[in-house]
Each structure stands twice: as structure tokens, then as C-alpha cells.
Amino acid sequence: MPDGFPLGRWLKEVRTGLQNHAFDEKQTARLETLGISYEEKEQTWESMYRMALEYFTRNGNVCMRPGYCTEDGVMLGAWLDRQRRYYMDLSEEQKEKLGVLGVE
């Protein structure tokens, strides 16, 4: 944002708060009205994984530079790079799915 507000960091903190039930019912309802939910993070991961799987199916690997963008402008290379860097923080299910792509 032009004023320098760290919106991404705030959103991450809010989602963590939702996961940990840190907000009361009224606050949670207001956030959900804005379309913010913890589940959205999972949906985003699954969506990115499907794109990586499509890339893998077409190319036989997921060897791409961190700057690789899909035709739709999605930073798939950066996402995949983050999955490799933070592999130990992923769920077992996510690790298994990435293993199908050869990511460890």
C-alpha cells in the first residue's frame, strides 16, 4: 500500500488469531463478513498445489526459477520456493502432496 501499512502481515496475524480462537464471536463475524477466514489459507495452498501439479504433468518436473509466473500472472515459482524453504513447517499431507512432485 502507498502509506506503507503492512497489510499482508496484518492478514497473517488475523488468520492466526482466527485459528487460535483469539477473537470473540462478534469480531469473528465481522472478519468473516470481510471474507477473511483461516480456511482461505488452506484453499490458497490447494489452489497453488494444483497449478504446480499441472506444471509437473506438462513438464515432468517442477524445476522452475523463483521468478516463474504462470500465464495468469501467478507467482508459482516463488510459491514453490517458499514450500521448499519452509518444508518442515508444512503438514504431513502437504509434504506427501509435494513429494508427488519430487519436492523434499
Image (cartoon, rainbow, N blue to C red):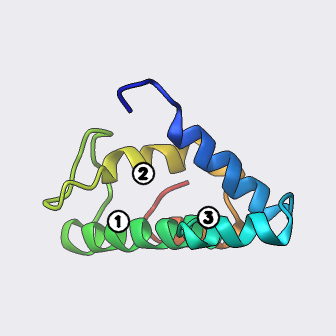
Q: Pick the quarter of the image with the C terminus.
A: bottom right
Res. 89 in view? yes
Q: Position of residue 30 (x, y in %)?
A: 66, 67
Quadrant in which the N terminus is drawn: top left
- Mark sitting earlier along the chain (2/1): 1
Image disc number at residue 80: 2
- Left or right: residue 90 versus residue 4 is right
- Mark 2 near mark 1, Cβ–Cβ under 8 Å? yes
Q: Nearer the viewer, mark 3 or mark 2?
A: 2
Check the image and report above or below for 82 versus 40. above
Q: Is residue 65 left or right of residue 70?
A: right
Numbered tag placed on residue 52 in the rendering? 1
Q: Where's residue 88, x and y in %?
A: 70, 49
Taking the spot 52% from the left edge, 50% from the top edge, the residue there is: 83
Residue with the mark numbered 3: 95
Q: Secondary structure at mark 3?
A: helix
Residue type marked 2: Leu
Q: Are marks 3 and 2 in contact (CB under 8 Å)?
A: no
Distance Cα–Cα, label 3 vs label 2: 12 Å
**Given the image, on which type of amino acid does mark 3 rest?**
Lys
> Where 83 falls versus 94 (above or below)?
above
